[in-house]
Structure formats: C-alpha cells, structure tokens
C-alpha cells in the first residue's frame, strides 16, 4: 500500500534494520521485513487494542512514525486520539482514554505527585523547549518581576519554566507575572514587547526564529543542565501496564524503534509525517526533529531525569514528595530493560531505505494547527 511517496514495506525495512537485536530477532530480505512480533517470543499479546494521543506538537513526532511498527507488533485496533494541545496528554493517560504516549517529564511528575494512575517507562529524547525573551531578558534571572506567557497554569510550559526559575533560585509563584495566552497570541505579544518571556515547544521556536521575534535565552537541547536530561518520556496508564505486560513491552519496543528511525533518517521521517497529515510544516518540523533527535536515548538514564526534575519541582513548591518517593510510585523500568536487551544500537552505516523517489516540498506558511 502506498502512502504518498512511501511504500509501507520499505518503511518497515528501514525500521526493522534499526531494531535488529544481537540474536537476529528481525531478518531482512530485500525491502521486506518480518513481523515485529518475535521480539516477545513465547508470549501472546493480551490485547490488540492500543490508543495514543495526537496533538499538534512535534515533540511527539516519533510516536507518529511508529504507526506501522505498532501495527506490525500486533496492535490491529490502533488509534491516535486527537487533542488540541499537549496539556491533554496527561489527563488522557490517567483516565485510560490513552494507553501509552510520549509526554513531558515535568508534568508527568506533577501527575504522579497528585496520585494519577500513570507510570513512566522510558526516556525518548533530550531537549525540546526553548525560552525566548525580549532584549530586556538576557538570562532566566532577568524574568524576575516581568510578564511571562504560558497557555495555562500547570501546562507543560508553565511546569518546565517553573523548574528553570527554581534552578536559579527564583520563586515561580511570586517572582514572575504569569499571563495565560494561546501560543499564537503569546508570540505576537512577545513581538510587541508586551510580555518578556515565552517558553516554546516545536514548532513555535522555529516560527519565532523565522519571524525574528525575540531571542533565545535558553535552548534545552544544548544548554546545561537541561540538555543532560530527557524532555519527553514514554508513559502509560497504570492499569494498562498491569493488565497487559506483553502489550506494554511491544508498544515500547515499537516507539523506541521509531525514535531510532527518526534520529537516523529525520528527512524520511518528517516526509512521512507530512504525507500522513500529522503536520503540514515540513521545514519547521524537520528543523525541530533534527534538534530534538540529535542524541541517542540509550546514553541517558530516565531515572536521573525524574530525580532532577523532581528536585526542581520540590524546590518550586509544585510537589511535596521527594524524588525518591515519586520514582518509587510512578516508574517501572522493567519493560525498558527488556526492550534494551532486544533493541541493539542502530548501525552507523547502511541506514537508508531502498531507493525512493524524492519530491520537493514547497515551504508552507506557519499555521496554528502546527503549534505545540
């Protein structure tokens, strides 16, 4: 079946090539790949139904790339539930409307602290967000007493920026003036100088740079300490994990395989996203994917991420439990250990698809639907 310019078997061949274990779990033959189901040899999948969340944010690009891999893993009843923004991911996981999804480390910790039935399974990629400011803001400390825009209190931008303020000794509740505005309005206010800070997620930073609005104060993909920890992690509904351990493992395997695929062939991955309608902005999305998938998830410890952000949130007064308690309550690393034993690091060569025709894509103007 052709999807745009993509042939499904070619896509799976590429993905399977990234998923070969040292035991030779997947076997390639030309442009064909065996099913991913052998990664859980001897264990029957408990459910073929899987629900994930689709938002305009391209931080979750890899889980859309995982669509075919998830179907090959046995999830024949697969759906991406559309939500207007990433803030809806956490509630969807907690309610069981979604089973598994990429989500942000900080908001996941506030959910765990609140007793929501979510469990963190793995890290996905480093960095994602960028803090933009006016000329009056040259460092995070310069935000003291100034207006800062977020989509809503307790939204991912609010939580992450609160941890950044706490890291430099500011009190997020008292030292900045929070204003709530949707992203397009916030970016316009920043351009007009009516707010002084805005934390953007892909593809907002790409648009801000293209429009020469403000300047980057902190880039979590390159600036320490933020670049040393996961931004997006794989989380799941706790009941789903408890009832469906094999399905959980298969889903995690497919998603992390898609992270590898996106990392090592971002152009092909983003073209797939455009062809399937997950985004209309090829250039902005490609720039974002290049940045957020520039490092290997295997090189970072997801527990370190939860510990780091847990401490910052504790300092900010946004959680009352210490990180050790939060990790004990809300993390399960066994599925990740199993998948790591199956999913060898991707080879450094021979990573290309079978030859594909390449069609140029004209850059389209930014649209509200593509803002995270």
Image: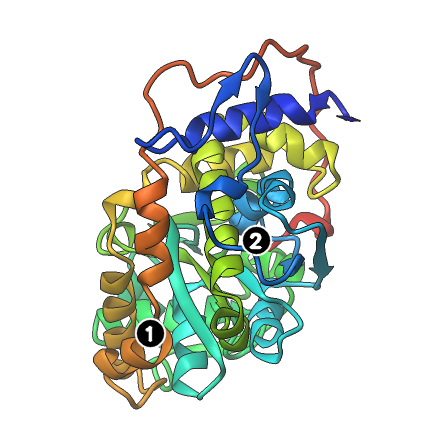
Query: Dot 1, crowdedness within 10 Å: few (<14), some or many (≥20)?
Result: some
Q: Is residue 25 visible?
A: yes
Q: CA distance from mark 2 to mark 1?
A: 19 Å
Q: Which residue is mark 2?
A: 191
| Point 66% across, 13% down: residue | 358
Q: Is residue 3 left or right of residue 60?
A: right
Secondary structure found at label 2 = helix
Give the numbered dot on residue 287.
none
Quadrant for residue 129, please give it: bottom left
Decide if residue 51 is in sight here: no
Residue to which mark 1 is pinned: 144
- Closest to the observer, 252 or 317: 252
What is the image's colouring? rainbow
Q: Position of residue 108 (x, y in %)?
A: 43, 72
| Residue 351 in the image: above or below residue 242 | above
In the displayed structure image, the side of residue 27 where residue 163 appears, left or right: left
| Residue at x 32% of width, y 38% of height | 295
Number of callouts: 2
Residue 294 sits in quarter: top left
Q: Position of residue 54 (x, y in %)?
A: 66, 56
- Labels 2 and 1: the sequence-earlier one: 1
Which quadrant holds the N terminus? top right
The percent position of residue 271, horizontal first and vertical second, equals 64, 28
Name the residue: 62% across, 48% down.
74
Whole-percent x, y for residue 180 in the image: 59, 75
């Amino acid at each position: 079946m052709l999807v745009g310019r993509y042939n499904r078997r070619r896509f799976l061949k590429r993905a399977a090539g990234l998923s070969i274990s040292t035991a030779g779990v997947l076997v390639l033959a030309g442009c064909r790949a065996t099913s991913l189901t052998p990664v859980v040899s001897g264990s029957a999948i408990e459910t073929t139904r899987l629900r994930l969340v689709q938002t305009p944010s391209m931080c979750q690009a890899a889980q859309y790339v995982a669509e075919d891999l998830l179907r090959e893993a046995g999830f024949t009843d697969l759906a991406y539930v559309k939500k207007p923004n990433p803030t809806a991911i956490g509630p969807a996981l907690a309610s069981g409307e979604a089973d598994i999804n990429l989500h942000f480390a900080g908001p996941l910790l506030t959910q765990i602290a609140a007793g929501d039935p979510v469990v963190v399974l793995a890290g996905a990629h480093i960095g994602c967000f960028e803090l933009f400011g006016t000329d009056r803001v040259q460092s995070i400390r310069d935000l003291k007493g100034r207006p800062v825009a977020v989509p809503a209190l307790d939204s991912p931008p609010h939580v992450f920026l609160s941890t950044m303020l706490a890291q430099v000794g500011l009190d997020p509740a008292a030292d900045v003036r929070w204003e709530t505005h949707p992203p397009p309005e916030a970016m316009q206010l920043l351009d007009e100088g009516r707010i002084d800070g805005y934390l953007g997620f892909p593809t907002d930073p790409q648009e801000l740079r293209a429009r020469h609005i403000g300047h980057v104060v902190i880039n979590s993909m390159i600036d320490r300490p933020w670049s040393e920890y996961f931004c997006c992690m794989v989380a799941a509904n706790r009941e789903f994990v408890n009832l469906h351990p094999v399905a959980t493992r298969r889903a995690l395997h497919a998603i992390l395989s898609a992270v590898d695929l996106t990392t090592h062939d971002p152009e092909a991955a983003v073209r797939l996203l455009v062809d399937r309608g997950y985004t209309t902005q090829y250039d902005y999305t490609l720039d974002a994917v290049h940045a957020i998938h520039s490092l290997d998830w295997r090189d970072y410890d997801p527990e370190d991420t939860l510990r780091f952000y847990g401490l910052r949130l504790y300092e900010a007064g946004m959680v009352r439990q210490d990180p050790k308690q939060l990790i004990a309550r809300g993390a399960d690393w066994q599925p990740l250990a199993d998948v790591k034993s199956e999913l060898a690091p991707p080879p450094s060569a021979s990573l290309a698809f079978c030859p594909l025709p390449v069609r140029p894509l004209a850059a389209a103007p930014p649209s509200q639907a593509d803002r995270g």
